[in-house]
């Protein structure tokens, strides 16, 4: 996130940068030096062969958990993080989907809304002939986000939801 923030500060164009509050508690390696991350440059968090999961923010971590569980069932999952949605690294996205021939878009917006619908449209438009299954979408349930933590947990997607979409996409539901 630091690298994207750095690049955003020094970008001449207006930038909107979102941080997900649930990511603050995640611990991991952070480089001592801030290295700018090029806007519009995606990252593959995990290489895979059977299905590409496209996710950002909290859903990247949930998708990595789902990929670990899928691996135990013999499903190889590539986890693709576009990092930025505008510009979207379409070349890297399409290359990943062409490699695996399947795609799952995981985001926190309501399933049929949000950036995931646009990513699914880009995949359908530019990689349709390579798809062996329809693009699956994982998102929040169609309801406002509740205040009660237990209800919020029910509404937002988790690793189990991503795993279910992965299995359905590869025909192992």
Image (spheres, rainbow, N blue to C red):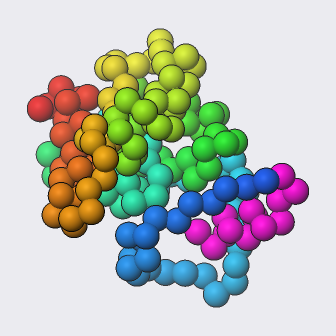
Q: Is residue 68 shown above or below 32?
A: above
Residue shown at 20% from the left, 30% from the top: 168
Residue shown at 21% from the left, 65% from the top: 148
Q: Nearer the viewer, residue 29 or 2?
A: 2
Q: Nearer the viewer, residue 34 or 25?
A: 25
Relative to 119, is 100 on the left or the right? left
Inspect the magenta stretch and tell me whether residue 12 lies in it.
yes
View extreme (top): residue: 129
View extreme (bottom): residue: 32
* Extent of the magenta region: 1-13
Residue shown at 18% from the left, 40% from the top: 164
Relative to 5, is 26 on the left or the right? left
Q: Residue 61: give x, y in percent of width and height.
A: 36, 61
Does residue 138 show up?
no
Q: Residue 53: give x, y in percent of width and height.
A: 38, 42
Does residue 2 show up?
yes
Picture quarter with the N terminus: bottom right
Q: Nearer the viewer, residue 127 or 59?
A: 59
Picture quarter with the C terminus: top left
Inspect the magenta stretch and tell me whether residue 42 lies in it.
no
Residue shown at 43% from the left, 48% from the top: 55
Q: Residue 118: give x, y in percent of width and height.
A: 52, 30
Relative to 28, is 126 on the left or the right? right
């Amino acid at each position: 996130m630091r690298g994207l923030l750095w690049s955003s500060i020094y970008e001449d164009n207006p930038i909107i940068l979102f941080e997900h509050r649930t990511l603050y508690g995640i611990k991991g390696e952070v480089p001592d030096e801030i290295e700018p991350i090029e806007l519009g440059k995606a990252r593959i968090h995990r290489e895979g062969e059977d299905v590409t999961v496209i996710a950002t923010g909290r859903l990247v971590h949930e998708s990595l958990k789902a990929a670990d569980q899928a691996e135990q069932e013999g499903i190889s999952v590539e986890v693709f993080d576009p990092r930025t949605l505008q510009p979207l690294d379409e070349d890297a996205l399409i290359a990943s989907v062409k490699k695996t021939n399947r795609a799952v878009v995981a985001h926190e917006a309501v399933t049929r809304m949000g950036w995931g619908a646009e990513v699914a449209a880009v995949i359908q438009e530019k990689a349709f002939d390579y798809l062996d299954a329809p693009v699956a979408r994982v998102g929040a349930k169609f309801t406002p986000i509740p205040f009660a933590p237990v209800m919020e947990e029910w509404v937002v997607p988790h690793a189990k939801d991503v795993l279910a979409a992965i299995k359905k996409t590869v025909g192992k539901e």
